[in-house]
Amino acid sequence: MTRKLAELTGPQTLERLTADSVLLVPIGAIEHHGPHLPLITDALVAEAAVEALVPAAVQAGIDAWQLPTLSIGKSDEHHWASGTLWLNATTLFETLVDLGRSVATTPARKLVFVNGHGGNVALLQVINRELRRRFGLMVFSTGALQIPAGTGDDGPDELGLGIHGGWAETSIVMHLRPDLVHPELFARNVPEEMTTYEHIGFNGRPVTFGWLSDDFGPSGVIGDPTGSTAEAGKALFEYGIGKGLEALAEIDRFSLPPRAGSGAP
Amino acid sequence: MTRKLAELTGPQTLERLTADSVLLVPIGAIEHHGPHLPLITDALVAEAAVEALVPAAVQAGIDAWQLPTLSIGKSDEHHWASGTLWLNATTLFETLVDLGRSVATTPARKLVFVNGHGGNVALLQVINRELRRRFGLMVFSTGALQIPAGTGDDGPDELGLGIHGGWAETSIVMHLRPDLVHPELFARNVPEEMTTYEHIGFNGRPVTFGWLSDDFGPSGVIGDPTGSTAEAGKALFEYGIGKGLEALAEIDRFSLPPRAGSGAP
Amino acid sequence: MTRKLAELTGPQTLERLTADSVLLVPIGAIEHHGPHLPLITDALVAEAAVEALVPAAVQAGIDAWQLPTLSIGKSDEHHWASGTLWLNATTLFETLVDLGRSVATTPARKLVFVNGHGGNVALLQVINRELRRRFGLMVFSTGALQIPAGTGDDGPDELGLGIHGGWAETSIVMHLRPDLVHPELFARNVPEEMTTYEHIGFNGRPVTFGWLSDDFGPSGVIGDPTGSTAEAGKALFEYGIGKGLEALAEIDRFSLPPRAGSGAP
Amino acid sequence: MTRKLAELTGPQTLERLTADSVLLVPIGAIEHHGPHLPLITDALVAEAAVEALVPAAVQAGIDAWQLPTLSIGKSDEHHWASGTLWLNATTLFETLVDLGRSVATTPARKLVFVNGHGGNVALLQVINRELRRRFGLMVFSTGALQIPAGTGDDGPDELGLGIHGGWAETSIVMHLRPDLVHPELFARNVPEEMTTYEHIGFNGRPVTFGWLSDDFGPSGVIGDPTGSTAEAGKALFEYGIGKGLEALAEIDRFSLPPRAGSGAP
Amino acid sequence: MTRKLAELTGPQTLERLTADSVLLVPIGAIEHHGPHLPLITDALVAEAAVEALVPAAVQAGIDAWQLPTLSIGKSDEHHWASGTLWLNATTLFETLVDLGRSVATTPARKLVFVNGHGGNVALLQVINRELRRRFGLMVFSTGALQIPAGTGDDGPDELGLGIHGGWAETSIVMHLRPDLVHPELFARNVPEEMTTYEHIGFNGRPVTFGWLSDDFGPSGVIGDPTGSTAEAGKALFEYGIGKGLEALAEIDRFSLPPRAGSGAP
Amino acid sequence: MTRKLAELTGPQTLERLTADSVLLVPIGAIEHHGPHLPLITDALVAEAAVEALVPAAVQAGIDAWQLPTLSIGKSDEHHWASGTLWLNATTLFETLVDLGRSVATTPARKLVFVNGHGGNVALLQVINRELRRRFGLMVFSTGALQIPAGTGDDGPDELGLGIHGGWAETSIVMHLRPDLVHPELFARNVPEEMTTYEHIGFNGRPVTFGWLSDDFGPSGVIGDPTGSTAEAGKALFEYGIGKGLEALAEIDRFSLPPRAGSGAP
């Protein structure tokens, strides 16, 4: 039976959903990913992850549901590149507020953003709290796929900088949709100077900074797709889904006190 | 080869798209459709229409492309019903402005909203002009499927009032996704008093009015799904696609003078 | 006794208005209408229509009231032309929301936008529903004057394309304010290519499109004022008022269930 | 010949207006004025003032023009009273920005808000500068009528507190529209405690404060209409017009350096 | 014991504040003040005034509290000058609404904006009322320092036009922070033509107008700092504080009826 | 000589700042910190950090400047607590955009937000990119003080959950402003259940979630201030400043290509 919320009827949502239901929203991006990957990469990965996670979670006893994919995200860092479809920060903010307000009319109280695009992360963190305060929901955000870091499996020649169109992402798309990948155009573009910083960095460093993808060269790639393979992609995907299931199990047993939410901004 | 824009790479959009390209955006809704139809009805129909139209149009020599589906629309008339996911008018407005601004960075100049939800129509008409003025695009909006009116094929017992969850829509979903239809819950809800008005009406009458779907009874249906069949749905769908192709041929040869757009609101 | 709402005192509105009162708001535009018609054309027609309709409706037993004219509308299609005064779509949206919120503090529950400008139509349809949802009002929108179509009286040489500064509109202004019309500058500007489309069109066609008035030539006229006469204008005006009265009689007996409105966007 | 801008055609605005033209915009309010004055009071006074000022100014060699009246203003202080039609501060702000942007497409560079409502004053001062910065206009705001203060002609029993529905305003409406005044309901409501403050006050005091009209009693009047007469109103009106003409003569010879304006907020 | 609200703990605000508490918010600007005064001038003066007023008011039996300084204001008139930090009118409006909403969660009901920047005055007057309507507060705005006008002490050679970087302001900064003043760069820039107007003026005249500070010359100064002295500044400051204390005493005994506020815009 | 930007004159900013200047903005919060810490905690720490960092950085050859403190941040998680002063996410967003637009008029190109409040982090990351895209700036965000984690110095009994009013923060305030700390009210409030999650967490975990500070008990504290000392606070502060200096040295040599910025949202 369907686990896609939108395939239910309205009245069914009243019967089938409860405060323990976990609603998963794939959110991605349609954005430039260099010459070798399709614009849809991030939306593809987010949707594929949710499509894998939901049945597995149900199998594990979690009342998980898939919501429609939000394909278009906040891709302002690629605004310069033909083909990028992007929402302003404020438009995405209002979209997600509207989504939270909508979900709050169902019996469900747990909403999880499963995110395929790094450029959405910070805004989702703002939204997590906004939706809790305004609508009393429990709201979570997570990357679509956790990547095994520091194992040599995260792109050995990327110096930890393979964040856009690099080895892991390219491998995953080769696994999911090999027809959309252009290996003949794989080209390394690693901003090696970034390794000279201890504090400033793309992820998990104490100093964050504002960058656009053409700040590191005209290709818009940050990473090294060379050596990507579908096999590696399959392994990365499965690893990520495994970790995602663990995360969903935690979300399932997580709780915060009920609250009404004020509705007001 | 793909005709989904988002399956191209960014650089491919520069090579493959031209000012003659016609970009089709399915736009729908996730909203209450009574006890017998899924929430996804309008998004489903819009996406199915575009998926049928694009290859047929390409076959006919039109450089047609499918853009990602905007599943969630302006369903304020069903805001009272659990399961409806909806954007405020202003949020949808900003979303579509952002989409137009994004498309304007590609070589394409023709954008077509293929709309599965009546509640989006007026806002799309506002947007048609907004995107032309601000970004210089040629922008079109059309219903996903034209329905053969006045032929007895538009729901004989509906008095012309089958606008939401009625005979035609139900039949079409029975054709597209029979597994999501609940015939045992078909129930006629036709606001017959509307036939006593000559000026006031839902569509194509000189006086429009603001209504919410529970203004006509708690079911939220406006129409009569009784007697809907997959066969009728198939015929309606094919009729609509045929008309849609005619419309695309007109859009293909249509032109307005080039203009830059001011960008500013 | 006055039938202009704004000529009442505040306390009188509590005594004189009831849930059966019908409040008419003339809404127009101040916009370029070619070299032969004044900027005020649309506001003039809307106001003249309401001034004719209200006393006639009262005569017919309808508790009708005239609200102040909203002269300035959404004339973005003429933004290029000196003299056009126009509101952004979002500004007009907020203005009309504020008006609805204001009206909701009176005993009246029926609000009718009597509209003289085609560029306002779609936004008014969005507002119809917005005001019902947010403030529980019954909200209607109608053209200021219905024009007898297909009778030869709608501009014989205009091919059905006389939508801005054409025969009917020019004739009506010659009837209402002959001093403001410049017959020596009448010049036909009919985008004849539009007749080659069956699907795409300005009005009542399945495919709408975004146009600016200078997309069809520098005059900004779409139609043929040649042959306009005050006599024809008088007949058109009277025909429209007659139809408007019929519409008001329907609005008077129309009802929807009471609802409170949430106030929230 | 007409001096109403909106009665010109678009092309005429290019010929008739110059950088020396002075455009007058009546701006008022539709708001509760107690039991004895009509809602339209402030819009009425503003419009009457402009209608008197423009021909007199033209007579005096000033290229003055009347723009359409903005009837509805920022009447949040009367939001509690049935019949008040009011715009939020932000809606009125955007409306006036749109008006400035529109005027900037004509050859005119001088825009004067002739204001009949105290609640608009501060917002107009914000707008004066906003329109200069964004559109390079010279923008002025002035009360519709200066009142001779401290002469005994400003409401002897009002202790200088006759700011809403008091002696002067009531007298002026008795002069302009005696049919809309209800002398049998004249009732003094003067917040006498305000005279005990030297710093805090309604006007021209160093400390301003936020008040709503029912903060001083349920009538919403602040002043004493007792003793108002049409004769006094006529004298006040003529005095105000005389002062207004002096002001227009100054505006006519006033100049600031040309500037382009950035357009941006 | 501290009289800075932000030095209390949250729970202390519940114990220490009452409906009689008077909360003072210094609000200034960081803006170009010519070559001789620092950008911080207006924020400096506002903060110094509050720091002097609060203990003196407490001494006088008023339950006064200092809130954090809002250093950055609406300095759009100096937007052209390097170093000016400024908020759009709408940003400052929303900031002050948020502040009012925050204060309304404490027991306090009296909020006073002590303002060091002329460009904030009108917006604060709009906010006074907005916060009363929305949050039921009593809200006051006052200049940080009243200046003894017409005594020869307000800049004898300034013709009453010393409104920005002139004699009084310069003297006060010389008193407060002599190290930040550059007397060698004192230069008179008085727009003498303004004295030829009786109606148009910067302050307290019936006609206000929109000006940017470089409309009167490239220095951005409006006034004459020549002859400024720390001694004069000390006298001016003390005079202003004396007047401010009188004003606070009035605010302390001032009251309006309790009201809840609607929260809504 | 001053290193506070706002103590310069406008013209001095043109002479003293260059593209290599590094502008530091302290940004904090005024929010409930439990019964033992003052509301000002986060603003205090941010400002103290910048006041220590700037002279040390100058000493180290970095052209560092202190901008005015933004005391009030996004404290929606404490909106329930009396005394919290907070900006909506969108208000803070617009404030920071206005600040970036202002800074872009100076010669400086490097802007660093030195942040004392966890609730600002995500929004600052959104802003980092927004300001780079719109104004071409290089924008960095960093915590005011890095804390030595995993050394036993980060609150031994806090299980890594001392994020609000806990051992480290309390110790630092005891170092900076012992007079504002209430040791008699120290009380442990550690949400121990959080240790049972591997994926969900407050910081640096793959799954983020929306929480309000009273979701973990009425005190609003998350951590254990017991055992806090001024000595520990001094050590933590000095460690953080040391790390901050290292970070500033990196920022100083960091560069991205010059770009103009589009200005547009």
Image (cartoon, coloured by chain):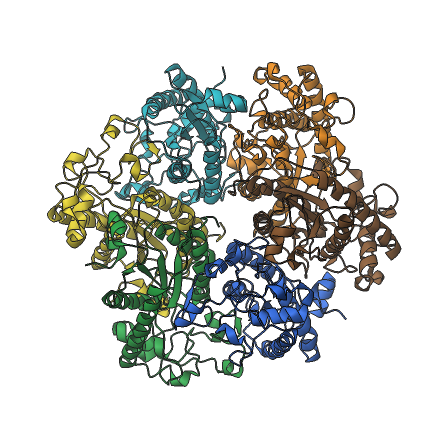
Chain colours: A blue, B brown, C orange, D cyan, E yellow, F green
Quarter of the image for residue C146 reads top right
Left-right relation of C112 to F104: right
Q: Looking at the picture, how far across and down is residue B29, in whole percent?
A: 69, 55
The image shows residue F229, relative to residue F127, as above or below, that is: below
* Nearer the observer, D173 or D242: D242
On the rendered structure, is B234 left or right of E186?
right
Give the tally of numbered discs.
Answer: 0
Q: Position of residue F81 (x, y in %)?
A: 42, 66
Extreme-front residue of the structure? A184
Left or right of residue A191, residue E202 in this image: left
Q: Estimate the x, y position of residue A203 in percent, counting from the top left.
A: 47, 70
Q: Nearer the viewer, residue B47 or E132?
A: B47
Residue F166's place in the image compared with E247, above or below, is below
Q: Is residue F90 above or below residue E232?
A: below
Q: Residue at x 58, y 58 (%)?
A: A31
Residue at figure coordinates x 83%, y 53% from the top left: B188
Residue B39 in percent (x, y) is at 72, 59
Quarter holding residue C233: top right
From the viewer's side, name the closer residue of C144 and C21.
C144
The N terminus of chain B sits in image quarter: bottom right
Can residue A151 be seen here? The reply is yes
Can residue E259 be seen in the rendering of this structure? no
Asked whether B39 or D87 is in front, the reply is B39
